[in-house]
């Protein structure tokens, strides 16, 4: 992975300018809505948005939230309503990293059921898992808890570059690997109609993420200046699912530094 390619990267409104940088992605407030399909069934929905800016350990951070709710009408799915939260920063090279991650299990009334505290000064990650296991792991540069794939994947979409994103999950360190292409596909999505897209291919190392996510996956991104994530096909505990965008909103966002 060549993280250095992000330094000095420019973002524009034409496809020739390449993928966006973090300044461009954080200049707007996005709300992305997805449905999760298993075979012919809609098994759940995902909402992703920047909630606000925040302060953590005396520094300015951003708060990214992913809300997942299940379709309880589907047999074997049950009622699930989980909020995944990340406070994150961006370094001088334009690379995001996690400061604090937590999961709120709303259907069971459990706040911070899971948390991963990324202490970059001490060089460690302190965590608590669902079974109340608590321990400490050594930290690596640009450490994440997985949610930042919303941004990191877009920094490379539509290029020939690869990335290897470190992820702390399930009491250990693993990696998400993305291989990108400049090849375009014409696809149709509800918020945009028929559009050109870029496809990326991915895999995981030593990861079993939320709902059993692991293994190989594919993702599609809009051919625009922000590389909006449109679709992902992946494996979870149910089997192979399709996560597909059904609504998209954005507006200018001014965050004080």
Image: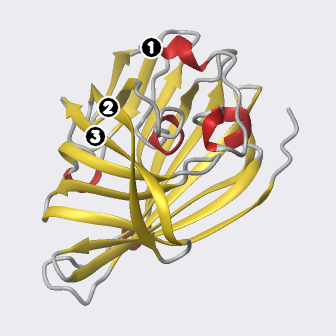
Asked if labels 2 and 3 touch by Cβ distance under 8 angstroms, the answer is yes
Residue nearer the viewer, 36 or 163: 163
Quadrant assignment for the C terminus: top right
Q: For residue 26, which quarter of the picture?
A: top right
Q: Residues within 10 Å of mark 3 (few under 14, many from 20)?
A: some
For residue 136, side relative to residue 241 (left or right):
right
Mark 1 or mark 3, which has the lower sequence index? 1
Report which residue position mark 3 lands on.
201
Report which residue position mark 1 lands on.
2
For residue 59, side relative to residue 98 (left or right):
right
For residue 39, side relative to residue 37 (left or right):
left
Residue 114 rendering spot, x and y as whole percentages: 39, 45
Quadrant assignment for the N terminus: top left
Name the disc covering residue 179, or none.
Answer: 2
Residue 85 rendering spot, x and y as whole percentages: 53, 49
Residue 92 in sight here: yes
Q: Secondary structure at mark 1?
A: loop
Vertically, is 70 above or below 103?
below
Mark 2 or mark 1, which has the lower sequence index? 1
Residue 10 rendering spot, x and y as whole percentages: 71, 27
């Amino acid at each position: 992975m060549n993280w250095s390619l992000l330094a000095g990267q420019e973002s524009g409104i034409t496809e020739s300018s390449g993928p966006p940088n973090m300044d461009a992605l954080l200049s707007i407030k996005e709300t992305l809505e997805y449905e999760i399909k298993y075979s012919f069934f809609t098994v759940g929905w995902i909402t992703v948005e920047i909630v606000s800016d925040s302060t953590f350990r005396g520094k300015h951070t951003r708060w990214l939230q992913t809300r997942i709710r299940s379709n309880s009408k589907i047999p074997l799915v049950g009622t699930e309503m989980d909020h995944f939260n990340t406070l994150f920063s961006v370094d001088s090279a334009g690379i995001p990293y996690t400061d604090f991650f937590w999961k709120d299990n709303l259907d069971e009334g459990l706040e911070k059921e899971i948390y991963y505290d990324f202490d970059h000064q001490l060089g460690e990650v302190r965590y608590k898992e669902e079974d109340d296991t608590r321990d400490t792991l050594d930290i690596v540069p640009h450490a994440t808890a997985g949610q930042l794939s919303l941004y990191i994947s877009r920094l490379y979409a539509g290029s020939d570059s690869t990335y290897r994103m470190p992820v702390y999950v399930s009491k250990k360190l693993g990696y998400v690997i993305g291989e990108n292409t400049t090849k375009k596909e014409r696809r149709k999505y509800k918020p945009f109609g028929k559009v050109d897209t870029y496809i990326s291919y991915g895999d995981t190392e030593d990861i079993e993420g939320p709902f059993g996510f692991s293994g190989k996956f594919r993702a599609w991104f809009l051919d625009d200046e922000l590389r909006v994530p449109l679709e992902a096909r992946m494996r979870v505990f149910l089997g192979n699912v399709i996560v597909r965008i059904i609504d998209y909103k954005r507006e200018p966002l001014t965050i004080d530094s």
